[in-house]
Image (cartoon, rainbow, N blue to C red):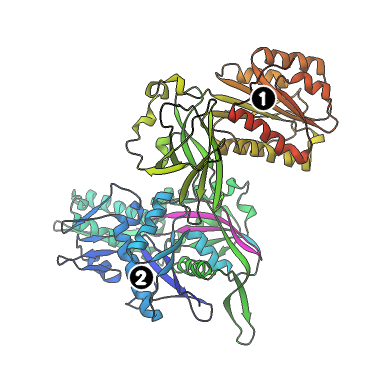
Amino acid sequence: MKVTTIGIDLGTTFSCVAAIDEHGKPIVLKNDDGNPITPSVVAFEQDGNVIVGDEAKNIQSLGDANVASFFKREMGNPDFYLTFHGRQHSPTDLSAYVLAKLKADAEKVLGKSVAKAVITCPAYFSAIQREEVKNAGKLAGLDVLRVINEPTAAAVAFGIKSEKEQTLLVYDLGGGTFDVTLMKITADEIAVLATDGNHQLGGKDWDDTLRDYAVGKFQEEFAANPLEDSATANDLLVAAENVKKALSQKITTNFVIAYNGNKGRYEITREQFEDATKHLINQTLTLCESVLAAKQMDWKHIDGILLVGGSTRMPQVESELKKHTDKPILHGINVDEAVAIGAAIQADLDANEKHYTLETKQSSGKSGYTLEGRRTIKDVTGQSLGMIAENTDRSQYINTIIIPRNTNIPSCEVRPFQLRTSSRQDNEIEVYVTQGEGIIPSGCAILGKYVISGITHEKNNAVCDIEYHYDKSGTVEVCAKQRSTGKNLTVRRDEPGDMSWTDLCPKDRDPEPELIIEPVTVLIAIDTSGSMSGQAFILAQKAAKDFLSQMDLSHCSVGIIRAPHGPKSKVILPPSQNATEIVKAIDSLTDTWEGEPLFEVIKNELADIDGQRFAVILTDGQWGSEETMIRQANECHAADIQIASLGFGSVNEPFLQAIANWDMIMTSPERFSESFSKIAQVITEGKTELQRRS
């Protein structure tokens, strides 16, 4: 039996609900007032009655202070509450009122109860914010199948109707948030390639700028600030929104301010408005270029720009985009309704386990949608997932990334974590999971403290493989297993508490040297000469990434060296604990003959680094000046730098033996990853004594 579901666009300023009808076609469900969109506004009456939607917005326009709006921007902020008639309301509570209204209105239209829904959120929402969206849905009586990104939903609504394969930039400017998403639509799937955004940038900021501009004129004329009165300030926000909408239709309009017995009437032109908000539109364009750059693309690589969100009706948006590209601006969807329609499609897909394709109904000449076919929908992470670690000299806490931004979801990454254990006490790991791109933990969201316990004492370093999961909604789960025993470990999530300690020096905060894992630094040198071109080079890059995935980046740094047969080598990335940076460096390896002799580069790069130091060299073919290279390699050996050499093809085996003081492995391109994994396991587990070869 087909499950009835709805898709909800929970917007900052307006929300919308849609469903799939009996013909398989997505339709927007109108509210009690007959409107397709519902204001995300909640009014509270003295008797406890709660009013949501159009009536609440009308109450707000009258200057009533007991009205909440724009609360979506504060979703996930534990310190934000609004108080009405003595009762506090969180952004989650307020969102639940809106969702309950949308659910009730949908049920009236459909004539049946509805429990299952997909709800949308900005692509840049953190896992904490997404979890609160789910919680709001639960409070509203909904079983939230998943939370999906707004631009993804809009692209689904567009892509389901499109038979043309194309790469699109989805420009989603709503009332309170901005997202940009790079999408590829093919015959088989609608796939997100990359996304970025700012959930504190939206149409409200244009309203605020317009209001402040007019208030400035009023202050010049009357030497009084109408924003000092809360009721007047609220009136002016409503007025600013109306003036903004008027300027989308006309070249000029008036902004009227009445305050303290004075009345100002100020003519505002579209040109003045656009000049005053130029900095805002530029922020959106910068984010667009960032998304394109993430996939080594620019404006010329896309087939079109899909506009989503009510604020894209401002003429400024289209005119500025046309200055950057000659690609078409696509208008195949209703900017207010597309997100809800895409969410409805996803909800029906999830609940009924089917895929979508376009079906053309030849008899009627109309297009509809069926649930048969192979077109799937793929999304990506909006932000990187990481953990707080110490840098290798223990001078600073850092954010080390585990799952980079724009990874396909659902996704799972396993990372080893080394620790010294005690036979006299319980052994635990505290893992602070982060979300964000910043190097410093304070610049990221702290998703929680995950306490991993039940670790069995080991003589050498214990290694726990920790799994980081992004589910289909972009929320996070952590689990762990002890490598030597294969035992699943207990993982408990706690509130992180006061995180000010991340600003301290780790040495000062935790000076117990017997519990500290010795830092490890590894340089990976890959031969990039012509003989390594083609499939072998691709497999070498994959092997380097596999090696990275098996390293404990909380205690280990990895650097990348380009080494075309050794004599002309160059550091592409100095030792780093940032997985995103390391992967980018591996991807950037090219056959450029410039630099210094390899072992001179290795020795200089590792000279001032404490702890264990390794170099892993992958090469084929013959090197020039082998005697000189062997002498320089011996200087690295004398400096306690452990060198492993991996060779294949026509490489000179005695030469590989001579430059390695740890291990020499003859391999093949098909076994690159296996060989690198063997080395990673030895380094991570620390069970093999690494000594100079005789």
Which one is in front in this view, the residue at disc 2 or the one at disc 1? Answer: 1
Q: In this view, does 70 lie above or below 679?
A: below
Q: In this view, does 208 lie above or below 344?
A: above
Q: Is residue 663 left or right of residue 51?
A: right
Q: Crowding at label 1, few (<14), some or many (≥20) Cα neighbours within 10 Å?
A: many
Residue 447 in sight from this viewpoint: no
Q: Is residue 67 left or right of residue 463?
A: left
Please tell me whether residue 191 belongs to the stretch shown in magenta.
yes
**Which residue is tagged 1?**
615
Please tell me whether residue 609 belongs to the stretch shown in magenta.
no
Q: What's the mark number on residue 102?
A: 2
Please tell me which of labels 2 and 1 falls first in the chain: 2
Q: Is residue 642 above or below residue 439?
A: above
In the rendering, at what x and y percent does residue 359 appear? 62, 77
Mark 2 → mark 1, Cα distance in angstroms = 60 Å
Q: What's the mark number on residue 244?
A: none
**Residue furthest bottom as drawn:** 363
Segment tinted magenta in the rendering: 168-196
In the rendering, at what x and y percent does residue 365 appear? 61, 84
